Every structure is written in structure tokens, then in C-alpha cells.
Amino acid sequence: MRKVLVFGNSGSGKSTLATALCAAENLAHLDLDTLAWVPAVPPMRKSLEASAREILAFINAHQAWVIEGCYADLLATALPYASEMIYMDLAIDACIANATSRPWEPHKYKSKEAQDKNLEMLIGWIRQYDERNDLFSRSAHQTLYENYSGKKSVFTENPRII
């Protein structure tokens, strides 16, 4: 059974690729954004333990799946169960173009307008990918990729069709 981790910078096409894989192969889909945060203002990360419990519940409930996100710590929780990983390592400008043209994500935002209000902040976040030294950075993603000994791929551009 296929069990895939898809990760990379914001705007790299993780959700688009995951959605396409799930539709083509009837895989379950988990977007880590849906379980990484406590619904609060300002936003606050859930504890790693709480998020890990949800990830493991998802893995135990599905034989074949795609888990996608930019959280190296949460991806590490799923890593022992994965059959492969895909690192979406697109250029910063490509990620910004993707973020600018992305459709409304109703599982993340109440409206397209609410999503668009965050676009300037998101673009700034995307631009910092190489400079940051956190769980969402290029260095964290490259370490995750390099340390995985299973089947793995790097995409440097968005695939046209899965």
C-alpha cells in the first residue's frame, strides 16, 4: 500500500500534488495544517504530542494515504510508517506564483477574502524559506529528506499530471 509524505515550502504545490495522488489512487489525505494549530487568536501550535496522536490515529485508520505539510516535526512522526516521500523543492519565485494563484482553501479559511488577507504575510514567509532555521525551513526539509532511506523523490517544478 502506498503511504506518501509530501513536503516543502509554502506554495510549493504540496496540497495540489497530494489531492491529485489521492484522487488518482484512492488514497486518504491528511493536510497537517488541519491538526497543527489550536484555534486561537493569535494562532498557536498544538503540542507535538497532541498532533502526533492525531497523525497516528489517521495512519491507523487508513491502509493507504498521503500526508502533506511543511512541519518537519510532524512529518517525522509519520516517517516510520511511510513507503515514500516527495520533497517539493521549488524555487522561491515559483512558490510565490503558486501562492498568488491558489484557489480558496475552505478547510483553512472562512472565505477567499480571508485567505487573500493573509497573502502578503504568506509571501514574506515563503521568501524567508532559505533564511529561516526552524521546522519549516529548507534546511529542516533537506535534513528530513537526506535522513530518509526509503523511496524518495525531489520535484523542482510542479508536475503537470500525476
Image: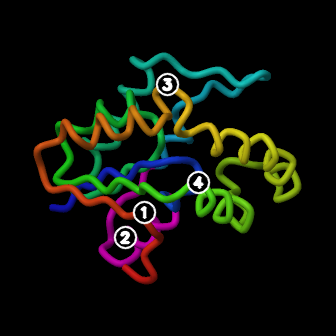
Tell whether position 138 is magenta.
Answer: no
How crowded pointer 4 is (Cα within 10 Å; few <14, some 14-19, many 20+) is rated as some
Q: Sequence order check: which comes first, mark 3 or mark 1?
A: 1
Measured Cα–Cα span from mark 4 to mark 1: 20 Å
User: Mark 4 near mark 1, Cβ–Cβ under 8 Å?
Assistant: no
Measured Cα–Cα span from mark 3 to mark 1: 23 Å
- State the residue position of label 4: 92
Residue 153, how many percent across, how many down? 25, 60
User: Mark 4 near mark 2, Cβ–Cβ under 8 Å?
Assistant: no
Residue drawn 30% across the image and 74% down it: 25
User: Mark 4 near mark 3, Cβ–Cβ under 8 Å?
Assistant: no
Q: Which is more foreground, mark 4 or mark 3?
A: 4
- State the residue position of label 1: 18
Residue 66 as seen in the image, left or right of residue 3? right
Q: Nearer the viewer, residue 91 or 56?
A: 91
Tell whether position 24 is magenta.
Answer: yes
Amino acid type at circle 3 is Asp
Which residue appears farthest toward the left when viewing the image? Answer: 149
Secondary structure type for disc 1: helix
- State the residue position of label 2: 21
Secondary structure type for disc 4: helix
Q: Which is more foreground, mark 4 or mark 2?
A: 4
User: Mark 2 near mark 1, Cβ–Cβ under 8 Å?
Assistant: yes
Measured Cα–Cα span from mark 4 to mark 3: 17 Å
Amino acid type at circle 4 is Ile
Stretch in magenta: 15-30
Image quadrant assignment for residue 132: top right
Residue drawn 41% across the image and 74% down it: 23
- State the residue position of label 3: 134
Q: Sequence order check: which comes first, mark 4 or mark 3?
A: 4
Secondary structure type for disc 2: helix
Measured Cα–Cα span from mark 2 to mark 1: 5 Å
